[in-house]
Image (cartoon, grey):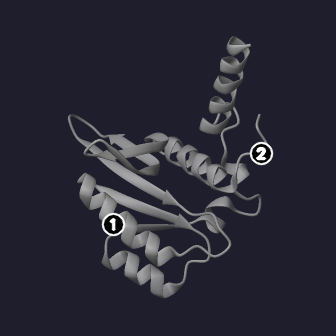
Amino acid sequence: KNDSMPKGGLAEEALADYFRAGGFFAVRGVPFRHDGEDLTDIDVWLYERGSGLGRRRFIVDAKNKKSPKIVERLFWTCGLRDALKLDGAFVAATGIKDATRRLARRIDITLIDLQVLGGANGLSGLRDNSRLSKDELDDLIAQVCQQHAS
């Protein structure tokens, strides 16, 4: 396994695994394109198929930084959720203040505290180590391409 995965990638993988365990289909790093241009990427895209024909789609914005700008991420995620006409959205971060929680409720974004979610072992304890992360798969593909180019 790749131990050099960036902190953000680790958080995204852990969150994807967390939601998979809850019955969601989860994909990391989904590009958002509009009018033929890459505008941004979605950290984690969630798809939930309930009973019958019902389905729900969500996005997760993950910021695993020492001092994330959570309020900015709330507004960004709210706008992206509305632009994509999704059923909901999450912002995952550390150091969430009560005022930020109140704002998140007001704009209908669910906050996930990465410190609480990760527990004492950190986010790496949430990872499903039986599967490759997106970063690990990308590294393996690059190695194969490099070997074929030689």
Horizontal relation, residue 85 to residue 88: left or right: left
Residue 79: horizontal and vertical position, in percent?
31, 65
The correct choice, above or below, for 85 with respect to 105 in the image is above
Which element carries disc 2, helix, strand or loop?
A: loop
Residue 106: horizontal and vertical position, in percent?
32, 79
Is residue 66 shown to the viewer in this render? yes
Q: Residue at x 73, y 59 (%)?
A: 122
Horizontal relation, residue 110 to residue 13: left or right: left
Toward which corner of the image does residue 25 lie, by quadrant? top left
Toward which corner of the image does residue 47 lie, by quadrant? top left
Give the residue at the far bottom of this rendering.
Answer: 99
The correct choice, above or below, for 122 with respect to 135 in the image is below
Which residue bears the numbered disc 2?
4
Q: Sort mark 2 into few (<14), some (14-19) or many (20+) by Cα contacts within 10 Å.
A: few
The mark lying in front, picked from 2 and 1, is 2
Q: Residue at x 45, y 69 (%)?
A: 73
Which residue bears the numbered disc 1?
78
Give the residue at the far front of this rendering.
Answer: 150
Q: Nearer the viewer, residue 30 or 48?
A: 30
The quadrant the N terminus occupies is top right
Q: Nearer the viewer, residue 23 or 14?
A: 14
The quadrant the C terminus occupies is top right
